[in-house]
Amino acid sequence: QVQLVESGGGLVQAGESLRLDCVASGRTFSRFVTGWFRQAPGKEREFVAAIKWSRWSGWTTAYTDSVKGRFAISGDNAKNTVYLQMNSLKPEDTAVYYCATASSPSAWDMVREYDYWGQGTQVTVSS
C-alpha cells in the first residue's frame, strides 16, 4: 500500500512558476516510478512527467512534449518526495495535478500503468 499526498498548487499569472510536491509513504519511494498527470475540466487525464531510479541507470525522467523545457521533475529519496517544478506557466496548464506510482519500472506515460494515486492539487494559470 502506498499513500501519496500532493501539495503546492495555487493561482498564478501566466509566465509565473509553481513547484508541486508529492510525498509518498507506506513503501520505499525509490523502488517506484513516480509520475505527474493532470486533468482539466472536461478532459481526459494526461501524462505530464515521470521519474524513476535504478541502480544501473540512476535517475531518469520523461516529459510530455507540451511541457518540455518548462517543467522539471526531480526526487529526494531521503524525504520520499517527488517535485514538479513548473516554470513559464500558461493558461493551458490549468488542471488538477496528480502524482502516481507504478508497479513496474518500465512504466512511463500511461494512466493504466500506475497503481496508486494522490488526491490532486489544483493549478490555475490566469492570463
Image (cartoon, rainbow, N blue to C red):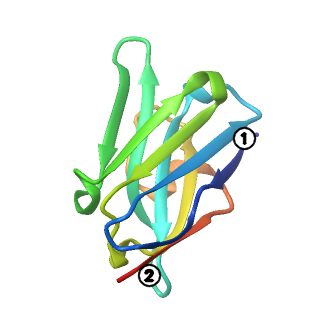
At x 41%, y 58%, the residue is 17
Which of the 4 image quadrants contains residue 121?
bottom right
Relative depth, front residue between 14 and 22? 14
Location of mark 2 (residue): 43
Which of the 4 image quadrants contains residue 89?
bottom left
Q: Amino acid at mark 1?
A: Val
> Counting other residues with Cα less than 10 Å from the Cα at mark 2, is it few (<14), some (14-19), or many (20 or more)?
few
SS for callout 1? loop
Query: Does 2 sit above or below residue 92?
Result: above
At x 38%, y 50%, the residue is 49
C-beta proximity under 8 Å, tags 2 and 1: no
SS for callout 2? loop
At x 72%, y 41%, the residue is 2
Q: Amino acid at mark 2?
A: Lys
> Counting other residues with Cα less than 10 Å from the Cα at mark 1, is it few (<14), some (14-19), or many (20 or more)?
some
| Left or right of residue 101: residue 62 | left
Quarter of the image where the C terminus is located: bottom left
Query: Does 49 sit above or below residue 14?
Result: above
Question: Can residue 107 be seen in the rendering of this structure?
Answer: no
Residue 109, position in %: x, y? 38, 52
Quarter of the image where the N terminus is located: top right
Among all residues in the image, which is located at the extreme bottom?
Answer: 42
Among all residues in the image, which is located at the extreme top?
Answer: 56
Separation of marks 2 and 1 at Cα, in angstroms: 26 Å
At x 56%, y 52%, the residue is 99
Mark identifier at residue 2: 1
Residue 62, position in %: x, y? 31, 43
Residue 114, position in %: x, y? 54, 49
| Marked residue nearer the N-terminal end (2 or 1) | 1
